[in-house]
Image (cartoon, rainbow, N blue to C red):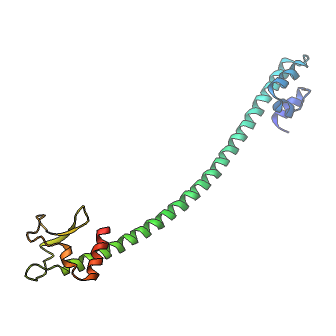
Amino acid sequence: MSRDEKRVQALNVPFSIGKIVHLPIDEFTRLLQAHPDLTDVQLTVIRDVRRRGKNKAAAQSCRKRKLDNIVDLGSVVGKLRSTRNSLRREKKAVEEDLRAYERRYESLYSEVFGALRDDAGRPYSADEFSLQQMLNGSIVLVRNDGSPHAEGATAADAADEPQKGARKKRMQKR
């Protein structure tokens, strides 16, 4: 028996604790008005029991909501972890693709640059020259100091063979 139950029983209150605590306020007020013979001590105990009972129910409801929120947050955290792992895998795959494209670019760059020759038929030095793609998609040979090459050699000069011409077209599409 709880403390409130003992007090209600000791004061001979004519209602159960469940009725005191769980009745809607209108019915509770009518119940008290229907019993004008209740003493002030009994009324005080009844109101205290109701207040503590309502507070207890509110506390239980709050704890339940808290646990429900924890469970919901746990599932959200699980989904976010799954998403994070998926994004990490995707990032790794993209980085691998990027490295493969970089290797492919370097290979194509070396192949095209190696095929370029000056007017005397000598290859251009990679220390002095580099290839640069223009906004229109054409590729030109420029000095590494940024000045244009006087002879105006372009990557198109290296595309004498049909196979190399096809590579140039692919490079221009990028």
- In this picture, residue 1 sits left or right of residue 153: right
Quadrant location of the C terminus?
bottom left
Q: In this view, does 73 lie above or below 33?
A: below
Determine the residue positioned at 44% across, 70% down. Answer: 93
Determine the residue positioned at 89% across, 32% down. Answer: 16
In terms of image quadrants, where is residue 110? Answer: bottom left
User: Residue 8: percent from the left, percent from the top?
Assistant: 86, 29
Question: Which of the pair 113/121 is nearer the observer?
Answer: 121
Question: Which of the pair 107/41 is nearer the observer?
Answer: 107
Determine the residue positioned at 62% across, 55% down. Answer: 75
- In this picture, residue 163 sits left or right of residue 48: left
In terms of image quadrants, where is residue 130? Answer: bottom left
Question: Which of the pair 59/162 is nearer the observer?
Answer: 162
Q: Is residue 104 above or below residue 86?
A: below
Determine the residue positioned at 36% across, 74% down. Answer: 100
User: Residue 128: percent from the left, percent from the top?
Assistant: 11, 73
In terms of image quadrants, where is residue 118? Answer: bottom left
Quadrant location of the N terminus?
top right
